[in-house]
Image (cartoon, rainbow, N blue to C red):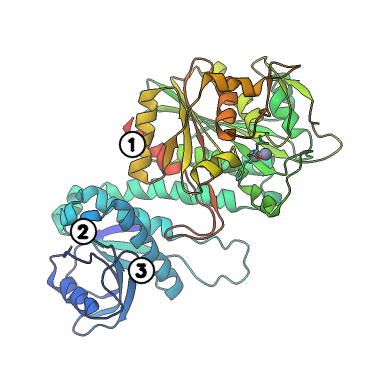
Amino acid sequence: MLHFTTVDLKRATVKTLLVPVCEDQALHSDPVVNGLVAAAMKLEAFRGKKEQELVLHRPPNVPVEQVLFCGLGKADQLDPEALRRAAGKGAKRCIRMGAPRLWVAVPDEGAAGLDPATALAALMEGVVLGNHLFDRYKKEKENKPLARADFIVPADRARRSAGLPARIEAACRGTLLAREWVNTPSNEKTPEAFARSVAAAAKKGGLAVQVMREAELRRRKFGALLAVAAGSRNRPALLVLEHRPRRSGETVVLVGKGVTFDSGGINIKTGPSLADMKCDMAGAAAVAAALLAAAALKLDRRIVGVIPLVENMVSGGAARPGDIVTSLAGKTVEIGNTDAEGRLILADAMAYAVKAYAPNVMIDLATLTGACVVALGEAIAGLFTRDETLQAQLLAAAERTHERCWPLPLPEDYKELLKSSFADINNMPSAREGGAISAALFLSEFAGRTRWAHIDIAGPAYHKKESAYCGAGGTGFGVRLLLDWLMNA
Ligand code: BES
Ligand code: ZN
Ligand code: ZN
């Protein structure tokens, strides 16, 4: 849907034009665009301030039906995220107005001191990410997403950036796919149904797919995962996706928490947030979507996605607090709390990944703890790793994609908190404080000697309210982060 175009706005038939505007500096040299900006800035309601918007219908002397101006604030403070947001809001407005096609007046190369490729990429990302509706369960489909967006640039710039639209689309489509999976209600994404949905997409996308079901998981002794699955009549699965290019050296394993619904189990959750617990497979969705995008982009690295899928429910068969199970790694685990189920399924998935693939590096994504949301808020993920290089790489990817992460520590002495009187380890820490850290420390016990990072996405994976380039619900957080890391590390 993303295209470059070189048009003369005086003559071309452009119906809906998006114009980014700074309050204190011109971003465009095109005289028609500048004329439009000057007309807009004459109005009281628009000064080009950050997040300001204005729509002009049928401006004089230009054959454009409507112009969407988006304010970016001061030029010396402009960052790619402001462009992403502006473009996202533009795409959303087009959806609301019923416009099928959007033209974007791209700022000149070097405008506002931004790297031209970064600025262009951010605008494109904003359009694709904002151009998404999840209306599968609405009988009346009120609106339609944009079918096409044209980025107006000089011909030589289009030539130099020829590969960009396809690259941005592949990555952002991954994000949208992850959002769709997260938004799907739990009654329609049991572990089996979700596994099928991912497997079908993965096969189509050229990934190797393997699905282990309950009998095999039992044979292979996935004791911790099976304990979480015990309370649900919807049986668990372990999904393994593999992107294997012909020439590949290192192996990367990505692990994603896939709890298709987290009721808490016998330690049942209370409070109004229970309906949001369909989001507890957001790590799984991000990993699966990132692998699909990696295949589409033909990345030249072996990437394996290991995705444990369970439903954490309550029944006569459910695991009880105090139960002791033997994990795949051989460590016994006391289930101090059935609501700390994520670390149980991840423990087995990580131990399996280490044994089966001996990866050079392993990253897990998980909506793991409410404590991480308390620590960092809804917009920032917690990043845990003992590997400084990996940490620097992931923080750089987080910065570039604005899928923000903040490093949190893995202090050895806090392992005290996970001591069990009866088993090798307890899944429930003895203190409430530092809950994101004790959860990460639990996982660290199952990473072996592998270079490993854990990203707690409980905050950013799911937002009740819509934002500039995302609707309410699943955000698809992690897909662009992982892809950026895969392409640059
Ligand atoms: N799925 C939850 C964590 C979560 C919280 C995800 C908020 C998304 C939004 C996880 O399984 C959980 O319940 N964790 C417990 C751990 C505790 C029992 C040690 C928590 O955070 O309270
Ligand atoms: Zn839980
Ligand atoms: Zn959970």
What residue is drawn where x is 33% and y is 69%? 52
Residue position marked by numbered label 2 in the rendering: 75
The correct choice, above or below, for 116 with respect to 312 in the image is: below
Q: Are marks 3 and 2 in contact (CB under 8 Å)?
A: no
Structural crowding at the residue carrying mark 2, measured as other residues with C-alpha within 10 Å and reported as few (<14), some (14–19) or many (≥20) = some
Question: What is the quadrant of the N terminus in the image?
Answer: bottom left
**Is residue 199 among the parts visible in the rendering?**
no
Asked if residue 436 lies left or right of residue 294, the reply is: right
Name the secondary structure under disc 1: helix
Alpha carbon separation for disc pair 3 and 2: 28 Å
For the image, the number of numbered tags is 3
Of the two numbered discs 3 and 1 in the rendering, the one whose residue sits closer to the viewer: 1
Structural crowding at the residue carrying mark 3, measured as other residues with C-alpha within 10 Å and reported as few (<14), some (14–19) or many (≥20) = some
The correct choice, above or below, for 315 with respect to 90 in the image is: above
Tell me which amino acid carries mark 3: Arg
User: Picture quarter containing residue 306?
Assistant: top right
What residue is drawn where x is 57% and y is 41%? 198
Name the secondary structure under disc 2: helix
Q: Position of residue 4 (x, y in %)?
A: 25, 58
Residue position marked by numbered label 1 in the rendering: 396
Tell me which amino acid carries mark 2: Ala
Residue position marked by numbered label 3 in the rendering: 101
